[in-house]
Image (spheres, rainbow, N blue to C red):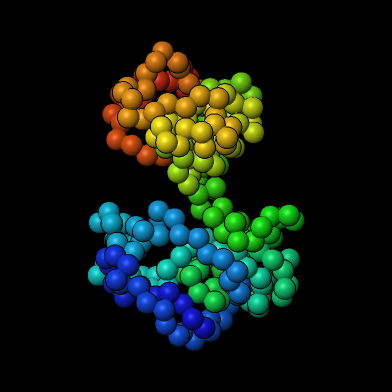
Amino acid sequence: MRAVVQQGFGGTEQLSVQELPDPTPGEGEVLVRVTAAAVDRGTWHLLTGLPYVARPYVGLRSPRFPVVGRDVSGTVAAVGAGVTGYAVGDRVLGTADGSCAELAVVPVIRLVPLPEGLDPVASAALPISGLTALQGLAKAHRGDGVRTGDRVLVIGASGGVGSYAVQLAASAGAEVTGVASAAKADLVRDLGATRVLDYAAGPLDDGTRYDLVLVVGGSHRLRDLRRLLVREGTLV
């Protein structure tokens, strides 16, 4: 199979397309023929090996995962021992340790059937960023999640995680304020935000207090963020 392989830590000069042996799924794993693979911020961290604190996971001196990519959408090509609920030909979505390849092995616990009507190419951008947003919102109200009528502030609302967080919070009935650049204000409103604050326009504290503040990007001081919360609010 062809795969995008990372030679070492650095920039895109470390990447090349190589021929590798077809992988074989083990117990509890599924072999996916890749339709699409997404490249998110996490892929950049794995490519550069930064921050250094992540090196025990990504590899100390060389990449632990030489085939790049995590998000994957595709079709089941084979199933390993003990796998139930999936058959060859099923369309699936999940996360793999190396999705930028023609074939990827995916543990069945990191796989779901592709929902009907969801474009298989667009869906490849969903798993990691979407799940990260969902996990962040789930921490509101001591783990009960966002409720109808909550005020939610998403800092970094136009990025991968932030754009999903805005949509998920709005669909849960929350009043969402997004923080993004002025150039992306219309995008954030289209995603469901009722207000958009320009991150470059000054302090975020305009007197509004939030039930949940979800920080995806930026370099804000902790005490300033906590000041934005209601008494029992949650900061993620």
Q: Is residue 91 above or below residue 190?
A: below
| Residue 78 appears left or right of 180 | right
Which residue appears at 29% of the width and 35% of the height? 219
Q: Is residue 63 above or below residue 152?
A: below
Which residue appears at 73% of the width and 54% of the height? 117
Q: Quadrant of residue 223?
A: top left
Which residue appears at 41% of the width and 32% of the height? 182
- Foreground: 161 or 201? 201
**How many numbered marks have been drawn onto this rendered protein structure?**
0
| Residue 120 appears left or right of 212 | right
Q: Position of residue 168 (x, y in %)?
A: 59, 37
Q: Position of residue 151 (x, y in %)?
A: 53, 22
| Residue 177 appears left or right of 112 | left
Q: Position of residue 181 (x, y in %)?
A: 39, 34
Q: Is residue 162 above or below residue 200?
A: below
User: Which image quarter is the C terminus in?
Assistant: top left
Which residue appears at 42% of the width and 68% of the height? 68
- Foreground: 23 or 182? 182
- Foreground: 35 or 99? 35
- Can the viewer see residue 196? yes
- Can the viewer see residue 29? no
Q: Quadrant of residue 172?
A: top right
Q: Position of residue 186 (x, y in %)?
A: 51, 33
